[in-house]
Image (tube, rainbow, N blue to C red):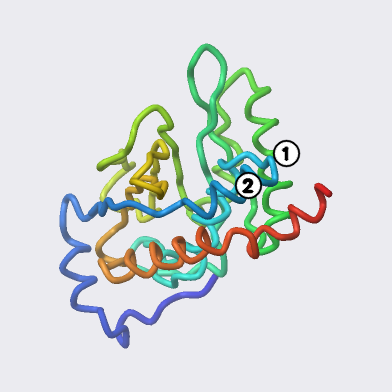
Amino acid sequence: MKKLDIASWDRRDIYKVFRGMGVPHFSISTELDVTALLAFADRKKLPTYPLALYIMCRAANEVRAFRLRLRGEEVVEHESLHIAPTVPWKNGLFNFVTAPYHEDPERFISAYREAEARSRAMDALNLEDDAAVGDAALYTSCVPWFHLAAASNPVFSAEDSIPRVVWGKYVRRGRRSVMGVSVQCHHALVDGRDVALFLQKAQELADGAAAVFAPLARRRR
C-alpha cells in the first residue's frame, strides 16, 4: 500500500468536488456476454460462481482506480484487492466470505472454497475475515433468481470507498447468454471510464475463459 500525492494528482479538483458530497457514490449497470464462459464451465463440469468471482476480482485488480481508498484526508493505493462475496447460508439467509486474491485461478478458487466452507459452517455472521483485510477488498454479490437491470448497494458512510459489483441470472439473447452487472464506486476516486475499463477487462476474461481457466481444466482430466 502506498500514499497518493493528492497535490500532484491530475484529477485532484474532481476528487475535491466529490469528496465533499453527501452521496458521492454512483452506479453503472450493463450486461456482460458470458456465452464462452458458460460453454467452458459446462464442458468442463465446473461451477460458474467461483469463475465469475475470479473474473471480477482480477478485472478490479487490473484497474488502478479500483484499488484507491479514502483514509481520512489521504488517498492510498492498495497493491491488490481481495474478494469479499456473499454465499447462501442457513435458513435462506446469506453469510459473508473474504478470500485472498491470487492471479493463478487455481490458487484463487482453492482459497475461495476454503473461505466459503468456513463461512457456511459458522453459527454467526462472518465479520472477522472482512475486518482482517480492511478496505483492501472488492465487495461482490449475486442475485441468481432474476436478470439484473440495475442495483444500489448500502454503504457505511460517504467515506466508504470500497467498490461493489453485483450480477444476476444468466439469460439468453438469441444464441448468446448475457449477465446483468452493476458496478458501484466512489466518484472521488473512480470515474465512468474506469468502470468501462473494468467491464472491458471482465468481458475479455469471460470471452477467453478456456485459456484463463486452463489450469483448472487440466487438473480435472
**Upstream in sequence: badge 2 or badge 1:** 2
Q: Which element type, helix, strand or loop, lies under badge 1? A: helix
Residue 90 drawn at (x, y percent): 56, 15
Q: Residues within 10 Å of mark 1 (few under 14, many from 20)?
A: few
Q: Which element type, helix, strand or loop, lies under badge 2? A: loop
Number of marks drawn:
2
In the rendering, which numbered label is found on residue 114?
1
19 vs 139, left or right, is left
Residue 219 drawn at (x, y percent): 82, 52
Q: Residue at position x 69%, y 31% from top?
A: 118
Distance from label 2 to label 1 (Cα)?
8 Å
Q: Residue at position x 67%, y 60% from top?
A: 102
Q: Residue at position x 37%, y 62% from top?
A: 70
Q: Are marks 2 and 1 in contact (CB under 8 Å)?
A: yes
Residue 123 drawn at (x, y percent): 62, 18
Q: Residues within 10 Å of mark 2 (few under 14, many from 20)?
A: many
Q: Specify the amino acid type for callout 2.
A: Ala
| Position above or below: 176 against 88 | below
Give the residue at mark 2: 99
Toward the viewer: 120 or 132? 120
Q: Specify the amino acid type for callout 1.
A: Glu
Residue most extreme to the bottom = 8
Residue most extreme to the top = 91
